[in-house]
Amino acid sequence: MARPVFLSLDGLDGTGKTTQCRLLVEWLHAQKIPVTACADPGGTSLGQELRRLLLFGREHPIATITEALLFMASRAQLVEEVIRPALDRGEVVVSDRFLLANVVYQGHAGGLTPADLWLVGRFATGGLEPDLTLVFDLPPELAVQRRQRDADRFEDRGPEYYARVRTGFTYEAGIRPEKHRLIDATPPIDTVQLEVRRHVSRLLTEHGWNLSSG
């Protein structure tokens, strides 16, 4: 019997991770695999309010530690309302970001201790973590060029912050290769999606899912 699988996709804004999430979910639907898609922060009514505040709420200054804890609160609610119920139903869950983003943005790039964020994050999620996180890598200047919307609070922080974010992602991917896969996001979208499917197919097969070719 197939076992539930929890996947997250992460990386710099502008790497195409949200597009890759959408394409992956569409492919899983075509494979007749039950799938729940979500975004972190967000995915619940509380999470959406926190997402607006964190990404676009410029009316209040937010300390880095406060920022980190607000992300944790949104994620805790997402796990409670969406992710755990879907996994309990035996589904595949695809999340646009998860705890790794906190560790990188507020830790490696923001000055907090990454180990502390991992610890608090595991408490907030009840120890739940993705079976696999795909980390999309792109030079920051190219990611900025690809971004097709107004900058959020984090993207406004400039190239030095963005460079630290990229370094944080590559570092974390390197120290836990069994959980994180670094994916080159410079090729065309369809080429990147094939690489995504290659990694996901292997994991799904290990969990007992039957996949058609393509």
Image: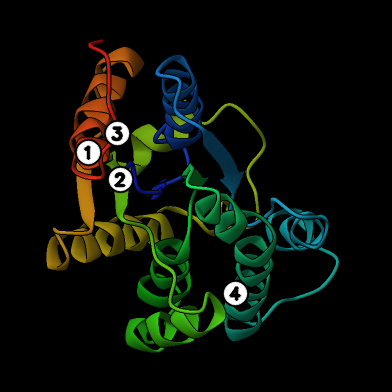
* C-alpha separation, residue under disc 2 versus residue under disc 4: 20 Å
Dot 2 corresponds to which residue? 134
Q: Quadrant of residue 172?
A: bottom left
Mark 4 or mark 3: whose residue is earlier in sequence? 4
Q: Give the CA distance from mark 3 to mark 2.
A: 19 Å
Q: Quadrant of the C terminus?
A: top left
Distance from disc 4 to disc 3, alpha carbons, whole Å, reads: 31 Å
Q: Which mark is residue 72?
A: 4
Q: Residue at x 67, y 37 (%)?
A: 150
Residue 42: give its label: none
Q: Amino acid at mark 3?
A: Trp
Residue 11 shows in this picture: no
Residue 194 vs residue 214, the one in the foreground: 214
Query: What residue is disc 1 on?
Result: 183
**What percent of the width, then of the height, locates residue 120?**
48, 86
Residue kind at label 2, given as amino acid type: Leu
- What residue is rendered at 27% in x and 14% in y? 212
- Which residue matches tag 3? 209
Residue at 28%, 31% in the rendered image: 185
Amino acid residing under circle 1: Ile
Instruction: Identify the image quadrant of the N terminus.
Output: top left
Residue 210 position in % (x across, y down): 27, 26
Mark sitting earlier along the chain (2/4): 4
Q: Residue at x 33, y 86 (%)?
A: 115
Q: Residue furthest front?
A: 1
